[in-house]
Image: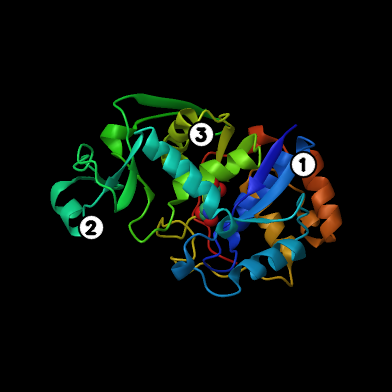
Amino acid sequence: MYRGRFAPSPTGPLHLGSLLAAVGSYLQAKSNKGNWLLRIEDIDPPREPKGAADLILKDLEAFGFEWDGVPQYQSTHLAFYQDVVSDLLTMKKAYYCSCSRKLISQTAIRNNTGFIYTGRCREKSLSDGAIRLLTHDKMIYFNDKLQGTFKQNIEHEVGDFILKRSDKQYAYHIAVVIDDHLQNITEIVRGNDLLAVTPRHIYLQSILNYHIPEYLHLPLITHPNGDKLSKQTGAKPLNKKYPVQQLYKVLTMLGQNPDKSLQYEPLNNFWEWAIKNWELARVPRTIPQFVNEM
Ligand code: GLU
């Protein structure tokens, strides 16, 4: 059975960009007669304003999303993450690292996405610090259902990456992989900004002997200057008063060609039409024109 999910980080209210990811994953799940689960990725408390998770749930409800089961909260899963990270350490597939940010910035190679960690602490057998995953000189390939084939040599292009930071916070990469496994997710539909980190997830899944789900990375909405619409770039929160107009807008960006009249329909008619007529083949890989916020 198809199981999809939406996994927002509660770093602020939902905006048009997050709505597009929610709508794409919801329509994929519903049109496949599957489940759609909700997971709040609240593992970075300093970045999470109080009450943001509740606001997200209220917005999703106001926009007519119906999720299966109860929402999961990553902050309640820390013991699972710890078990897995401890196992990886025991199996010598992960190791402690004491390099400071400053040292890394002085010694690591820099590419366009950040620093490539050189594995300085690999052989040191330390017993404290950040925990990194040991990577190998191996190309990881996967076939994204929308973006096509993507490949990456993690050791060369990223380096041994962090699973748990020295301040004891778990990294997104380990949390997302464990939760998608625990929730038996069969297909991951999310924004294309996460395409380049997917090889890390697939690598972790293979080391942990998890089933590897399908991946589908949706086009991003951008500001007129090309920056991704996000909380950091000042995206406006969704407006709960006019859900259908905003849903109509993202459905159009997703290439579904709804009739103009759909934006004036009640919420349930909108969803009925959208689920019935959803066609993945029409979704563009990128959203060509820069779109201003509503
Ligand atoms: N929590 C991530 C975000 O809000 C999404 C993670 C995912 O879908 O894998 O950007």
Quadrant in the rendering for residue 280: top right
Crowd tier of the residue under label 1, counting other residues whose Cα lies within 10 Å: few below 14, some 14–19, many 20 or above: many
At mark 2, the secondary structure is helix
Residue 87 coordinates in the image, percent (x, y) = 44, 38
Type of residue at label 1?
Lys
The numbered disc on residue 173 is none
Q: Which residue is mark 3?
A: 147
Seen from the viewer's position, the closer of residues 42 and 188 is 42
Type of residue at label 3?
Gln
The C terminus: image quadrant? bottom right
Q: Is residue 14 left or right of residue 101?
A: right
Type of residue at label 2?
Arg
Q: Which residue is mark 1?
A: 30
Which is more foreground, mark 1 or mark 2? Answer: 2
Mark positioned earlier in the residue sequence (1 or 3):
1
Q: CA distance from mark 1 to mark 2?
A: 44 Å
The residue that appears at 65% across and 70% down in the rendered structure is: 55
At mark 3, the secondary structure is loop
Residue 93 coordinates in the image, percent (x, y) = 36, 34
Q: Which residue is mark 2?
A: 101
Residue 223 coordinates in the image, percent (x, y) = 46, 60
Seen from the viewer's position, the closer of residues 109 and 241 is 109
Crowd tier of the residue under label 2, counting other residues whose Cα lies within 10 Å: few below 14, some 14–19, many 20 or above: few
Quadrant in the rendering for residue 35: top right
Mark positioned earlier in the residue sequence (2 or 3):
2
